[in-house]
């Protein structure tokens, strides 16, 4: 059957059809079978991800066909995210190394980075930024690349994730402006203050994690789960962030589907929920002054929940 396949477009279409027929889940950088198949085929052929459509009718050699078909089979048989099969993922317009040491780079925060955090930071100068729970380092490194005047710290508790983040710092050649630090949230950051803190912490509830498709089992559970309501880390960040923000500092945190639980727990806190091109996606923004003003309520909610 595959003998009839000849061109790049043929193999992309074939891969997408196989993925769809196999009932695979798409949520790691891509949300559909066609984009995943495109990434996989172009990677196998050592071609750029933004290859001109003019090359779509280029014919594959026998060796190239074998390489592409082998990756398609692995994606189906292993149900592993395509980024782990290719060793790379794209985030905020940049390529990052990706493997099971950290979650596959994916977050709507990429849209904020590429938009210069407008309008939220339009009148706020940023010199120092923190990427808390950095994983592969994609958020913090992207902030550094898109903002050449910023000094950025990447923080995580996982040695594996930090090792991958260091590789990505070197890969993107931002070592002069980006530090990689080990810390349990803010525990090892005494005295450090930032104009901007961005975090995509674990926020999957225990019940949600048990129902996740097989693709997610290849990722470190440490980077996903956050207690019965998904707020274990978000609440700790809300409590500790004021001590590490400058007076006009801003906190941005992604909580995904745990947004509802957070709003119900802290109805008095004026969360600014960011609207993205595809709608609201569980990312909030708070000024330091709001965190300080509502510190008692946040503390009481965290203690009551515990």
Image (cartoon, rainbow, N blue to C red):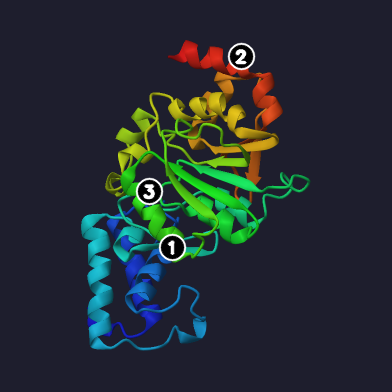
Q: Position of residue 231 (x, y in %)?
A: 46, 27
Q: Is residue 270 above or below residue 10?
A: above
Residue visible at 76% across and 48% down in the picture? 122
Q: Nearer the viewer, residue 287 or 170?
A: 170
Estimate the x, y position of residue 110 in percent, counting from the top left. 56, 53
Question: Label 1 crowding class (10 Å Cα cut-off): few <14, some 14-19, many 20+?
Answer: few
Residue most extreme to the front: 191
**Do residues under tags 3 and 2 come within 8 Å of each other at their CB atoms?**
no
Q: Which numbered disc covers residue 162? A: 3
| Dot 2 alpha-carbon crowd within 10 angstroms: few under 14, some 14 to 19, many 20 or more | few
Task: Count up the numbered dots.
Answer: 3
Instruction: Measure the C-alpha gap from mark 1 to mark 3.
Output: 12 Å
Above or below residue 269? Residue 214 is below
Residue 288 appears in which quarter of the rendering?
top right
**Residue 258 - label:** none
Q: Residue, x 61% and y 60% (percent of image)? A: 146
SS under mark 2: helix
Residue under numbered circle 1: 170
Separation of marks 3 and 2 at Cα, in angstroms: 33 Å
| Residue holding disc 2 | 296
Quadrant position of the N terminus in the picture: bottom left
In the rendered image, which quarter contains the C terminus? top left
- The residue at the far right in this view is 123
Q: Nearer the viewer, residue 292 or 208?
A: 292
């Amino acid at each position: 059957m595959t003998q009839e396949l000849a061109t790049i477009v043929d193999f992309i279409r074939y891969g997408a059809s196989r993925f769809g027929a196999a009932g695979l889940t798409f949520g790691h950088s891509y949300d559909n079978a066609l984009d995943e198949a495109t990434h996989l085929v172009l990677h196998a052929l050592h071609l750029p991800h933004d290859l001109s459509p003019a090359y779509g009718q280029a014919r594959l050699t026998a060796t190239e066909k074998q390489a592409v078909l082998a990756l398609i089979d692995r994606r189906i048989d292993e149900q592993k995210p395509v980024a782990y099969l290719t060793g790379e993922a794209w985030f905020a317009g940049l390529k990052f190394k990706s493997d099971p040491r950290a979650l596959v780079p994916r977050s709507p925060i990429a849209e904020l980075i590429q938009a210069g955090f407008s309008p939220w930071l339009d009148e706020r100068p940023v010199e120092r930024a923190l990427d808390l729970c950095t994983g592969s380092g994609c958020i913090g490194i992207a902030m550094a690349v898109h903002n050449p005047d910023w000094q950025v710290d990447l923080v995580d508790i996982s040695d594996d994730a930090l090792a991958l983040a260091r590789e990505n710092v070197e890969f993107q050649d931002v070592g002069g402006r980006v530090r990689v630090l080990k810390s349990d949230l803010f525990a090892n950051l005494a005295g450090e203050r930032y104009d901007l803190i961005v975090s995509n912490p674990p926020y999957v509830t225990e019940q949600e994690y048990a129902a996740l498709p097989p693709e997610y089992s290849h990722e470190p559970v440490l980077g996903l789960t956050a207690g019965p309501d998904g707020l274990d880390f978000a609440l700790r960040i809300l409590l500790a962030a004021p001590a590490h923000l400058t007076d006009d500092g801003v906190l941005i945190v992604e909580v995904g589907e745990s947004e509802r639980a957070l709003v119900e727990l802290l109805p008095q806190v004026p969360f600014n929920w960011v609207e993205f091109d595809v709608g609201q996606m569980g990312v909030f923004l708070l000024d330091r002054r709001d965190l300080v003003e509502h510190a008692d309520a946040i503390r009481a909610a965290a203690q009551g929940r515990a």
